[in-house]
Amino acid sequence: MRGHIVKRNRAVKGKPRYKDNWNIIIELGDDPQTGKRKQRWFSFRGTKAEAERRLTELLHQLDTGTFINPGKTTLGEYLGKWLNGYKPNLSPRGFERYQSIIDKGLIPALGHIMLTQLKPEHVRNYYTTMQEKNANPGTVRYHHAVLHVALETAVEWGLLGRNVADAVTLPRLRNGEMETWDEAEMTRFLEFARDSAYYELFYTALYSGMRRSELLGLRWQDVDLDFLQIRVVRGLHQLRDGSYVFTEPKSQKSRRTIALTPSNASLLREYREKRRQQCTMLGTQLTDDSLVFCHYDGNPFRPNSVTRAFKNLADKAGVKAIRFHDGRHTHASIMLKRGIHPKIVQERLGHSSIQITLDRYSHVAPGLQEAAAKSFDEGLHPEKNGSVSHSVAK
């Protein structure tokens, strides 16, 4: 037997009592010099089934040379090994982002610290330094998310007693980071974009609230121009090596159906006919599996090229500079200002809950509460048209 688990009866100070404590014992064979049996002991807190799974993981790590000794391992060494093991949980694009944060952020700043010596102040100082270098709170929170899940794994594996990232207060998101256009700015931008190769894409983005990756991954089979609907079932991303990957929606709520506006549907009908003619000239055929927004030859648009064209056209139109993703915020804020129920906006955007929608967009529509109050009053006193008598009817 290469290893086994033994339950420890004594309680561990400061640990929840509903968790059992175990010793995981790995047999390393006899020492060739002394002839004595060699073992390695590990402490583990959890259920028996979890301890057995951890035993299996440890044996695999010892066999593959990926075993981590927390007392002799730096955070940088741990993060590198952890990410390789965590890779199956990430999309290709997500893995690149995690790797970039670890290689360019966490390891240069914290990688030299021993894993077991990492303290909340180390993490707090790292976040403070990021903000001093003008990193926005959203970026800091993304770095925190990567570090937190990595340290949480170390806790689950029994390498650490606690996740020190839990003791660090994160910076609050600033509402000012979100910029949007009003109706006039959006209309002016689309007028200048009319001759662009991305016109139909930009129009659909602003009229549907879809993400860039969702638009680029859209196929004609996902567009129902008879019932005026778009089904969001995948996204397209470009990796650093130039290759393209299609990914599943980020959550179940992101997999959704969006109602098209009549003008958007009309535009897409004309665009589909234009694409058919282009395919005929090239000797190819437009199929249900063809990308909606792509080059003449059917190859995908480069995401960065789309973003760059969006910015350049906004500059030419003389409208406020916003990010491509802020077109999504523009769609949501205009809908809310026009009295569309937040639940509908949540479903169109694919937010996991209505609370996210309310928290994110309440500040871009300052007149919503006033309009709601007026509407409530007018509904109860239609004959007053806003001029309400406070006398009580007898």
Image (tube, helix red, strand yellow):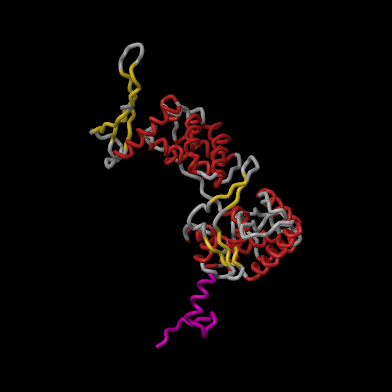
Q: In this view, which residue lies farthest toward the front? A: 283
On screen, residue 320 versus residue 250, left or right, reads right
Q: In this view, which residue lies farthest toward the left? A: 9
User: Which residue does the image show at 50% across and 35% down from the upper left?
Assistant: 84
Query: Which of the 4 quarters of the picture holds residue 371?
Result: bottom right
- For the N terminus, the image quarter is top left
Does residue 321 belong to the magenta stretch? no
The correct choice, above or below, for 331 with respect to 301 in the image is below
Q: How many marks?
A: 0
Q: In this view, which residue lies farthest toward the top? A: 33
Does residue 375 belong to the magenta stretch? yes
Q: Position of residue 271 (x, y in %)?
A: 70, 64
Q: Position of residue 137 (x, y in %)?
A: 55, 46
User: Which residue does the image show at 59% across and 55% down from the upper left?
Assistant: 214
User: Which residue does the image show at 70% across and 65% down from the upper left?
Assistant: 273
Q: Position of residue 245 (x, y in %)?
A: 59, 47
The correct choice, above or below, for 369 with respect to 295 in the image is below
On screen, residue 22 versus residue 270, left or right, reads left
User: Which residue does the image show at 65% across and 61% down from the upper left?
Assistant: 181
Q: Out of 107 and 1, give the one closest to the viewer.
A: 1
- For the C terminus, the image quarter is bottom left
Q: Which residues are magenta?
A: 369-394
Q: Position of residue 123 (x, y in %)?
A: 48, 36
Q: Out of 41 and 58, give the one closest to the viewer.
A: 58
On screen, residue 262 versus residue 191, left or right, reads left
